[in-house]
Amino acid sequence: MAPSWIPPVGFTLVPSLGGFVGSYFVRGEGLRWHASLQKPSWHPPQWAFAPVWGTLYSAMGYGSYMIWKELGGFTEKAVVPLGLYAGQLALNWTWPPIFFGAREMGWALVDLLFVSGTAAATTVAWYRVSPQAARLLYPYLAWLALATTLNYTIWRDNRGRPGRRLPE
């Protein structure tokens, strides 16, 4: 039998794995392209994104552990709350490749709208099982509102601009 610390640590770290893979697109040429875009004055500083996402991913990961534990593992009762969670996480992980990799700001916005909807549904489903776990998603929902508004504003203000590759 695995030590008791493995499930909480594993669940807490899983969301960061996709975030780490997605960070591949948020460097080099993708980052230079992003720097060249017109952004609103309220755009958070670039250095803030990694610690914010690390915190949000850890909170949602631990919340998923709380739900998993409360429902006795991957049981039939866990299908909806953990399925919604997995769906929103997969959608979340697709945003960097769409925005920074493909440079499709409009499609990235569509993705964020789906992420936000499934994250809200996840929060409701989790609240029915564990209000404490659901509360761990509240900062994430607030950040998604900011991210969606930011994505929309950048898309709107740079709409005529092609997502071309920049010269080195």
Image (cartoon, rainbow, N blue to C red):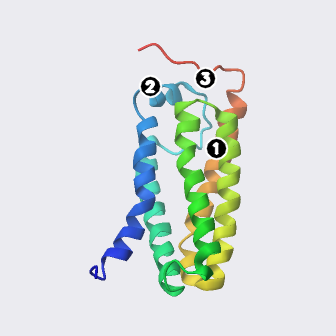
Q: Position of residue 82 (x, y in %)?
A: 57, 71
Mark 3 to mark 2 CA distance (whole Å): 12 Å
**Residue picked out by circle 1:** 150
Q: Depth check: 18 or 136 in front?
A: 18
Q: Residue at x 63, y 66 (%)?
A: 84
Label 2 CA crowd tier, 10 Å (few <14, some 14–19, many 20+): some
**Residue picked out by circle 2:** 29
Three-letter residue code for mark 3: Gly
Q: Quadrant of the C terminus?
A: top left
Q: Quadrant of the N terminus?
A: bottom left
Q: Depth check: 16 or 147 in front?
A: 16
Label 3 CA crowd tier, 10 Å (few <14, some 14–19, many 20+): some
The answer to whether 44 is drawn above or below residue 71 in the figure is above
Q: Residue at x 68, y 75 (%)?
A: 124
Task: Specify which label sits upstream in the sequence, 2 or 1.
Answer: 2
Q: Quadrant of residue 99?
A: top right
Task: Specify which label sits upstream in the sequence, 3 or 2.
Answer: 2
Mark 3 to mark 1 CA distance (whole Å): 17 Å
Three-letter residue code for mark 1: Leu
Task: Specify which label sits upstream in the sequence, 3 or 1.
Answer: 1
Q: Secondary structure at mark 1?
A: helix
**Residue picked out by circle 3:** 163
Q: Indicate which disc residue 4 carries.
A: none
Mark 2 to mark 1 CA distance (whole Å): 20 Å
